[in-house]
């Protein structure tokens, strides 16, 4: 099971009894003696300890085997394993890098929204903000897209739904038409050059001028498997009846 390095480091501290964790693990199994070989062949005080910690998206289980010691007491740990079990709403949240977004054509975006046509632009002010921005309306509608290609995580359990969270809002003083100011999520499988749309994703959602998280769900019925290559695309539509407004995407994450 591959987890990110930060999580593995935290697991190592927990497994060795470190106090660096701000949470108290729950003991699931504490077997002693356990069939753990040691240099002295003493197993009567050996131990197999399994503990669990609730983390974002599921539960992390850590099993550690300890050798026995001839003079009693617990010996050195000889093996540690970790298993992540996601909840029904996906697993660990993985942030998609805004600067990795591509146009609908799959080519790089630029700082200018609408280049290529219908593509968000990246807007960064050092030390202040980093967002993806759409084209400004002018008593009109503008649709801009951002595409990410990624692999389904190794921790993914087949059949689980994958929540994708998009944080977005619009700016500007134009008169916004709420019903047609929306976010839509599309997802596709990518197999040997063949792209296929995934059906059953949450429908378009209206968004506002306040930065808010909007959750879309890729259904478990899509039949995805760990390691599979997919593409996720956010479609942002902003409509004004008068004046200008600009949509922006602040963050995107997928839990799997």
Image: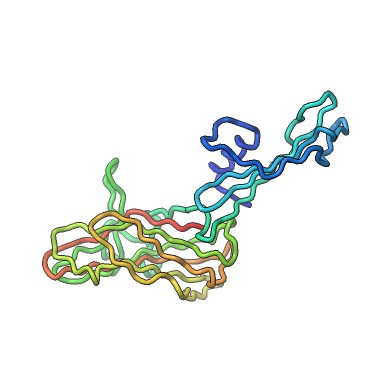
Q: Colour scheme used in the picture?
A: rainbow
Quarter-of-image position of residue 246: bottom left
177 relative position to 69: left or right: left
From the viewer's perspective, is residue 76 above or below residue 179? above
* Outermost residue toward the left in this view: 242
Q: Residue at x 25, y 60 (%)?
A: 208
From the viewer's perspective, is residue 100 above or below residue 200? above
Q: Horizontal and vertical percent for residue 49?
A: 71, 40
223 relative position to 172: left or right: right
Quarter-of-image position of residue 253: bottom left
Q: Horizontal and vertical percent for residue 217?
A: 45, 66
In the image, 27 versus 243, the foreground residue is 27
Q: Horizontal and vertical percent for residue 205?
A: 32, 67
Q: Residue at x 76, y 37 (%)?
A: 47
From the viewer's perspective, is residue 111 above or below residue 194? above
In the image, 39 versus 61, the foreground residue is 61
250 relative position to 39: left or right: left
* Outermost residue toward the right in this view: 41
Q: Residue at x 18, y 66 (%)?
A: 176
In the image, 104 versus 88, the foreground residue is 88
Quarter-of-image position of residue 127: top left
Q: How many marks?
A: 0
33 relative position to 61: left or right: right
């Amino acid at each position: 099971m591959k987890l990110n390095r930060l999580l593995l480091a935290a697991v190592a501290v927990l497994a060795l009894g470190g106090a660096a964790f701000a949470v108290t693990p729950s003991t699931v199994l504490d077997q002693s003696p356990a069939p753990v070989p040691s240099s002295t062949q003493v197993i009567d005080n050996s131990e197999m300890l399994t503990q669990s910690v609730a983390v974002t998206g599921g539960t992390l289980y850590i099993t550690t085997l300890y050798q026995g010691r001839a003079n009693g007491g617990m010996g050195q740990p000889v093996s540690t394993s970790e298993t992540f079990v996601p909840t029904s709403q996906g697993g660990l949240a993985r942030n998609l890098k805004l600067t990795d977004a591509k146009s609908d054509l799959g080519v790089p975006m630029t700082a200018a929204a609408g280049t290529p046509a219908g593509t968000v632009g990246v807007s960064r002010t050092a030390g202040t903000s980093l967002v993806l921005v759409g084209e400004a309306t002018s008593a009109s509608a503008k649709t801009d897209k951002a595409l990410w290609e990624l692999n389904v995580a190794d921790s993914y359990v087949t059949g689980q739904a994958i929540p994708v969270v998009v944080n977005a809002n619009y700016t500007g003083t134009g008169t916004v038409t709420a019903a047609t100011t929306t976010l839509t999520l599309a997802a596709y499988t990518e197999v040997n050059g063949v792209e296929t749309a995934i059906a059953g994703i949450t429908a378009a959602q209206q968004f506002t001028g306040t930065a808010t998280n909007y959750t879309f769900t890729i259904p478990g019925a899509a039949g995805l498997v760990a390691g599979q290559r997919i593409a996720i695309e956010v479609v942002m539509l902003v409509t004004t009846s008068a004046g200008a407004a600009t949509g922006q995407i602040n963050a995107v994450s997928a839990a799997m």
